[in-house]
Image (spheres, helix red, strand yellow):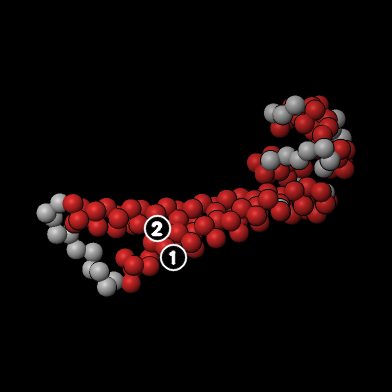
């Protein structure tokens, strides 16, 4: 980034004014203390007149940061999906227990289709699968 800025003949101040960020931000990016957001990377590529690919290939640390950010965006989404599966399994378990209790303590005769594999094992499978998947992605997210 510093090389491209200097190629344009811009000072850090001129660059931060065009990006609407602080001078300290530009300095930290150039010293590897922090990195710009993906939105800022897009603006930088436009300002420098180079592709994002070229910009990332120039700055190896920035490239690694973008790759890491992309991975971290994917992991929480997948972890969330497994958490939802766990909650669905838990909800089905509560429904099953609720219907069993209603049948036992009230004159209602609600039917769960007792021999159904889903009502017998579905909630458990969803809960265990959801918790295992969530744990795997939680660990993966922490590694990256």
Please tell me which residue lies in front, 83 or 100. 100
Callouts 1 and 2 close, C-beta under 8 Å? yes
Residue drawn at the location 31% of the way across and 65% of the way down = 119
Residue, far front: 105
Q: How far apart are marks 1 and 2 (CA)?
A: 7 Å
x and y percentages locating residue 59 in the rendered image = 82, 49
Q: In which quarter of the image is the N terminus?
A: top right
Please tell me which residue lies in front, 16 or 141. 141
Q: Residue 125 carries which label?
A: 1
Helix, strand, or loop for circle 1? Answer: helix
x and y percentages locating residue 43 in the rendered image = 69, 40
Q: Quadrant of residue 3?
A: top right
Task: Answer with left or right where residue 20 lies relative to residue 82.
Answer: right
Residue drawn at the location 78% of the way across and 47% of the way down = 62
Q: Can residue 142 be seen in this view?
A: yes
Mark 1 closeness class: few <14, some 14–19, many ≥20 residues within 10 Å: some
Please tell me which residue lies in front, 16 or 78. 78
Above-or-below relation of 32 to 118: above
Q: Residue 89 carries which label?
A: 2
Above-or-below relation of 30 to 108: above
Above-or-below relation of 116 to 92: below
Q: Residue 99 carries which label?
A: none
x and y percentages locating residue 139 in the rendered image = 65, 55
Task: Answer with left or right where residue 130 lies relative to residue 105.
Answer: right
Please tell me which residue lies in front, 116 or 33. 116
Residue drawn at the location 77% of the way across and 31% of the way down = 25
Looking at marks 1 and 2 on the same chain, the residue that comes earlier in the sequence is marked by 2
Q: Can residue 8 be seen in this view?
A: no
């Amino acid at each position: 980034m510093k090389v491209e800025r200097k190629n344009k003949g811009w000072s850090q101040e001129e660059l931060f004014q065009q990006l609407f960020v602080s001078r300290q931000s530009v300095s930290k990016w150039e010293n590897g203390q922090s990195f710009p957001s993906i939105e800022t990377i897009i603006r930088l590529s436009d300002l420098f007149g180079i592709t994002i690919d070229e910009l990332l290939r120039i700055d190896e640390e920035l490239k690694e940061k973008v790759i890491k950010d992309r991975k971290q965006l994917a992991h929480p989404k997948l972890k969330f999906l497994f958490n939802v599966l766990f909650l669905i399994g838990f909800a089905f378990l509560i429904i099953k227990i609720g219907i069993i209790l209603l049948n036992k303590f009230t004159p209602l005769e609600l039917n769960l289709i007792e021999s159904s594999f889903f009502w017998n094992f579905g909630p458990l499978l969803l809960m265990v699968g959801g918790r295992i998947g969530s744990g795997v992605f939680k660990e993966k997210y922490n590694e990256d």
